[in-house]
Image (tube, rainbow, N blue to C red):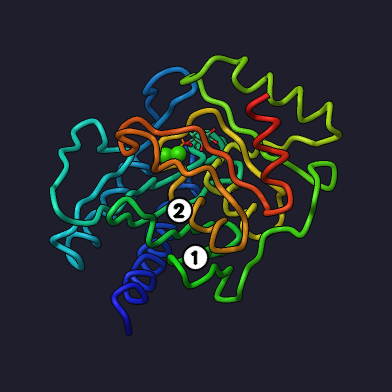
Amino acid sequence: MSDIAQRLEFACDTARKAGQLAFGYFSNLSSLTVVSKGIQDMASEADVNTENLIRAAIAKQYPNDDFFGEESSDTYQAKQGCGVWVVDPIDGTQPFINGIRSWCISISYIENDQIIIGVIYDPCADEMFAASLGHGATLNGKPMKTSAAKSVAEGLISIGYSNRVTPAATLDPLKRLMMQQGMFHRSGSGALSLAYVAAGRLLGYFEPHMNIWDCAAGMLLITEAGGQTYDCLQTDNYLISGSVVIGAADGVYAQLLNIVEG
Ligand code: IPD
Ligand code: CA
Ligand code: CA
């Protein structure tokens, strides 16, 4: 098995184990301790312990690799000369802590400024979205493709927002989307929405700013499933600064880009 195939298998296996742990917390929400990291930004011991599980698995299997996870990002110090695993242990924390089933585990591996592995696991639906660079994308092991739609009018575009940007940064494109007969969608998990774009369920996704742990896996899923994305890794210091995120089916991307840019 090639190194990339081994890494993909490892990422899927780890995402599934992390999903089982997180699902245990989700099944017993009344005993979960939730703390606020800021307005609309919560974390629980589920986020922290799920990240710890993933981090330990990576340290054991790939001790020379770097690790960058949301819950430990504040103290991150880059290792030089190696690839980095970029992890969001639970994306969709708001839905998670409120008993809504749209949340997921997101694991990616970046080497030489290229996303090599992207895995998103939805424990509630037992859906594993997986891709490796140049080898296509799968949903539960079966090849997955973005939608064949040619216009935003043909389906749903998911839109994300956080208080890292102004409301106008989301509202202006939203208005333009509606003016072009598009329809918006918002599940509370940007990563899972990107996976849904890759699976052809949503036509596209737009958010003015996401951190790299929110979007790296989903972006590879989309491009490997035949869609297009804005290249978030072209942003200076992308690991720390994050980026605008745009991803869509091939036939819709240009229109969505135009809607975002105005
Ligand atoms: C958030 C979710 C949300 C998106 C935000 C993210 P979290 O991640 O993906 O849908 O709009 O930008 O920060 O806090 O649930 O891991
Ligand atoms: Ca996230
Ligand atoms: Ca998170």
Q: Position of residue 188 (x, y in %)?
A: 59, 36
Residue at the image position 54 percent from the left and 14 percent from the top: 166
In this rendering, the answer to whether 205 lies above or below 143 is: above
> Is 12 left or right of 64, judged from the image as shown?
right
Q: Identify the image quadrant of the C terminus.
A: top right
Q: Position of residue 104 (x, y in %)?
A: 50, 50
- Give me the disc on residue 80: none
Packing grade of label 2 (10 A; few <14, some 14-19, many >=20) is many
* Residue in front for this viewpoint, 122 or 161: 161
In this rendering, the answer to whether 238 lies above or below 9 is: above
Q: Which residue is mark 1?
A: 130
Q: Identify the image quadrant of the N terminus.
A: bottom left
Q: Work out whether residue 78 can be spotted.
A: yes
Residue at the image position 30 percent from the left and 47 percent from the top: 49
Q: Position of residue 97 (x, y in %)?
A: 50, 36
In this rendering, the answer to whether 234 lies above or below 119 is: above
At label 2, the amino acid type is Ala
Q: Quadrant of ligand 2?
A: top left
Q: Which residue is mark 2?
A: 217
Residue at the image position 32 percent from the left and 50 percent from the top: 113
* Residue in front for this viewpoint, 262 or 44: 262
The residue tagged with tag 2: helix, strand or loop? Answer: helix
Residue at the image position 84 percent from the left and 42 percent from the top: 153
The residue tagged with tag 1: helix, strand or loop? Answer: strand
* Residue in front for this viewpoint, 163 or 90: 163
* Residue in front for this viewpoint, 165 or 173: 173
Q: Work out whether residue 31 can be spotted.
A: no
Q: Position of residue 71 (x, y in %)?
A: 30, 38
Q: CA distance from mark 2 to mark 1?
A: 8 Å
Mark 2 within 8 Å of ligand 2, using the beta carbon: no
Q: Of label 2 and label 1, which has the lower sequence position? A: 1
At label 1, the amino acid type is Ala
